[in-house]
Amino acid sequence: MRKRKSSFATTLLVGIFLAIIAGALYLANSPMFERNAPKIEVSDSLYWNLRKPIRVRLVDDSGIRHYKIVLNDGASDFTVAEAVLETPKKDVTLEVTLPRAGWNRRTTQARMHIEVTDISRWNMLRGNSAKKEVKIAIDTIRPSAFVLSNSYKITKGGSALVIFSAKDEHLKDIGIHTSFGKVFKAEPFYKDGYYAALIAWPVTEKRFRAWVEASDLADNITKAHVPLYLKNYRYRRSNIKLKDRFLNGKIADLASQFDETLNVTDPLERFKIINEDIRAKNEALIHEKSSKISDRLIRRWSIKPFHPLKNAKKVASFGDHRIYYYKGKKVSESYHLGIDLASVKMADVRASNPGGVVFAGYNGIYGNMPLIDHGLGLYTLYGHCSSLMVTEGDTVSRNEVIAKTGKTGLALGDHLHFGVLVQGVEVRPVEWMDSHWIKDNISKVFEAARKMIDRRERD
Ligand SMILES: [Zn+2]
């Protein structure tokens, strides 16, 4: 009898014991007792201009109960943020600003101490805590930035050269910003602290404004206007009537090559897709391949006028706004972003300046097309070629034959589509084919800048 009773007690004890273990395991794994400390998202060390708030993000699985942020200017502590959250949040973003009074404005090194606790019952109900100390270097001095020399004018659709100085102890970004959102990158030029950039006024932009912008690691920003005389230019607008022979000939041929038009049977729809969607895709590739510039210091950059085709006749101009009609109805439109040159069939196409081949292949409506990088963000392209003599990665020398003209892509007769790009923007080729324009707008600007830099660095 005794034996039985004792065995029952043992079972009961074991049962209770197991229940306690299971309960403890359940609690330990329940969100109420989670053991993950909150995360504090802010870099370990940063630069601060005292004006722009420092962003601190706190994240926790179960929810944040309490946080506290203290700034120290080297002498005193300032509590700049503290809260006990009645409704815990999983994600809190704080914008730390300077304390209202008492901060020592002369201090250059500061510290930020962050403490955060979550709502977990872990740690004897105290929750999980995280702490972080951030080193702050204070920099309230704006970079120095000014334009040294620039091309006197820029024509709508054209190019200009800008040489400027930008200096700061913690310089981060420099570039030439524009009213249409494009930022032109600059290359280090001649001596430390000086930069050169080719810029462009896209043919499709009505207005143009450019300024040098230099920023430092503490986000101090200096802007300097580029004083360019703006010359408007009225580009041709032509109305083109689409003929059935063209739609059923060249367009039908092209349509059979592209996935986008493979199953489209309507000739006008095919034309629209080729002239708009495929054109945009082909130009996106050109823009991408012609956007890069080097970050190496350039001492000298000289360029000769481009004459890609000997004894050529110009058959179409840059910037033509072409509007296509079919039976009196507007069907599509596009801009012609190069010039068309024609001579004999399969004529030699030459690189007038040395460079590196960044693309050589078939590019839709542009046909077989080499694209050459001449440095400083200047690129040239040669469309509709019948054959190519270069491959991507090649270096070409002045006057080297790079291709033969043809009518691949969206071209009717044998001709060369010659395009010039400045950091991914198509520009007026006539400027780069004119020795006077190059002398006045490029060579002299470099010369003037070099003289000014030599004088400044001597003093
Ligand atoms: Zn063309």
Image (spheres, rainbow, N blue to C red):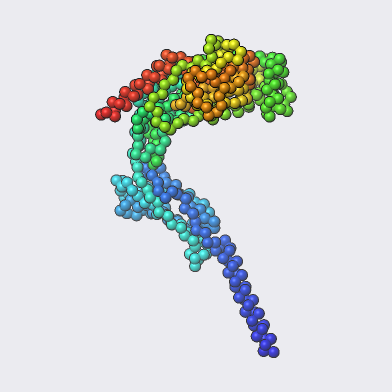
The percent position of residue 430, horizontal first and vertical second, equals 49, 15
Quadrant of the image for the N terminus? bottom right
| Number of numbered tags placed on the structure image | 0
The percent position of residue 191, horizontal first and vertical second, equals 34, 30
Report the side of 168 relative to 459 (left or right).
right
In this view of the protein, which residue sits in the foreground, 307 or 322?
307
The percent position of residue 14, horizontal first and vertical second, equals 63, 77
**Quadrant position of residue 274:** top right
Is residue 79 placed above or below 351 in the rendered structure?
below
Residue 230 visible somewhere in the drawing: no
The percent position of residue 355, horizontal first and vertical second, equals 48, 24
Quadrant of the image for the C terminus? top left
| Residue at x 66% of width, y 16% of height | 325
Is residue 210 placed above or below 72 in the rendered structure?
above
| Residue at x 66% of width, y 20% of height | 331
| Residue at x 54% of width, y 11% of height | 312
In this view of the protein, which residue sits in the foreground, 403 or 40?
403
Is residue 224 placed above or below 153 in the rendered structure?
below
Report the side of 360 relative to 138 (left or right).
right
Please, which residue is most extreme toward the bottom here?
1
Residue 454 visible somewhere in the drawing: yes
